[in-house]
Amino acid sequence: MEMSETVGRADREPSSDELLVAGARRGDMRAFERLYRMHSGRVYGLCLRMTRRPDAAEDCVQQTFVRAWRNLASFEGRSSFATWLHRIAVNEVLTQARNRGTRSESDEERVAELDREQDGDAPFDAADVMDVERALQSLPEGARYAMVLQALYGYTHEEVADMLGIAVGTCKAQVHRGRRLLRERLGLPEAET
Amino acid sequence: MNSHRPDALDEALSKLPKSVPTERDLWPRIQAQIEAERPGKDARRGFTPRWYQLAAGVLLVLASSVTTFVIMRDAQERAPAVATTELPRPEIAAMPASFAGYRLGEDYTKARAQLDLEFEQRLALLPPEAREKVERNLADIRAAAREIADTLAEHPTDPLLHELLMSTYQSELQLLAHVTQMAPATTKRVQL
């Protein structure tokens, strides 16, 4: 994994994106490939954390960029290209999950498994990046989706709610739940208010 | 954006990389899917809509040449001899003796000017319907030539474009010569 990523909004250099998007709109496949090279890592990271399966995440990335190519004309530049891509990616994850129809079952199984594993002590080490990753993956679907988008990729509750097609209040509740579960599993104290 | 104050959880989450490289390069699959959905799967081999336009233009040139031949043959069979004095000037203007930067010799330029003149004279003798068809065919050929020349300006080293351009140019000359050959004995033939 790349460890040199900056924290914050998933925005990239706008001018570079704008030039490449303009080129891709004219049918320049090389410009679009450059956009893919610049953004695919973040899109994959987002999809992988939402789907928890590399093969499913790869399918989502592929379909995200294919759909982005098809709909380049509709990209108005009101948000960054990265945000636009992430919206497509989230939609792709949700569509894929609906088509598979097994997400709730697998989530429940995973949560039950974690509950069995958790015998008083936190099963994950907050100082270990891989453990934090695993703890995030152990969250129930709704909380995980909201946490990935809000806490990891920095989108607002409103943006996350819009992406996931849920109410803002629901999003806040899912984030709250996700944070509480993560604290428990990582053995972290409650945040000071 | 995030309204939570930084704490141990936020600190732990901030260490997670936002970007995760895929295990394999997905671009070939993406490109293949995009190409498969594009109109004209040959686009990946460099055949753009412009090439199809050019190809259509060349076909039009061939069709125009054949049509002109048939028109002229029919006109020759039907039309009675017409006096060649006081010929009205046709509406179309002959193309200058240059072509997309090709430098043409002085002999050629003179022969071409003579051919253009004789073509215009001969064209004026044709029945209106036949004249209109010849003019239209000539316009089609010249439009195709301009299209090829424009593309050649963008791809000056493309050998196929050079060949197409010369072929179209020859078609134009053949059309001019074909019409002119039906003129009285004063007509001179131009070697193409």
Image: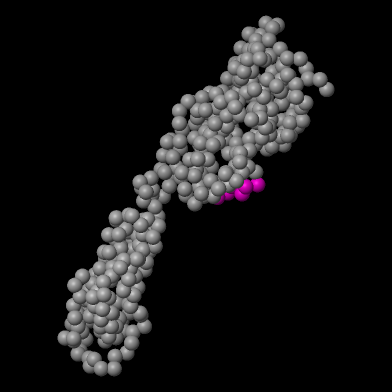
Residue B121 in percent (x, y) is at 27, 85
Q: Nearer the viewer, residue A101 or B133?
A: B133
In the picture as drawn, the residue positioned furthest to the right comes out as: A193
Q: State whether residue B112 appears in this view.
A: no
Q: Residue at x 61, y 41 (%)?
A: A13
In the picture as drawn, the residue positioned furthest to the front comes out as: B106
Q: Main secondary structure of the magenta part?
A: loop
Q: Residue at x 47, y 49 (%)?
A: A27
Which quadrant does the C terminus of chain B fall into?
Answer: bottom left
Left or right, A68 with reference to A161: left
Which quadrant does the N terminus of chain B fall into?
Answer: top right
Q: Residue at x 18, y 86 (%)?
A: B186
Q: Nearer the viewer, residue A3 or B47?
A: A3
Residue A110 in percent (x, y) is at 60, 16
Q: Image height check: is B7 above or below B47?
A: above
Q: Please identify the quarter of the rendering in which residue B144 is found.
A: bottom left
Q: Image height check: is B166 above or below A54?
A: below
Residue A63 in percent (x, y) is at 50, 36
Q: Please identify the quarter of the rendering in which residue B68 is found.
A: bottom left
Q: Residue at x 56, y 26 (%)?
A: A2
Residue A94 in percent (x, y) is at 59, 32
Q: State whether residue B84 appears in this view.
A: yes
Q: Image height check: is A88 above or below B15?
A: below
Q: Please identify the quarter of the rendering in which residue B64 is found.
A: bottom left
**Residue extent of the magenta highlight:** A73-78
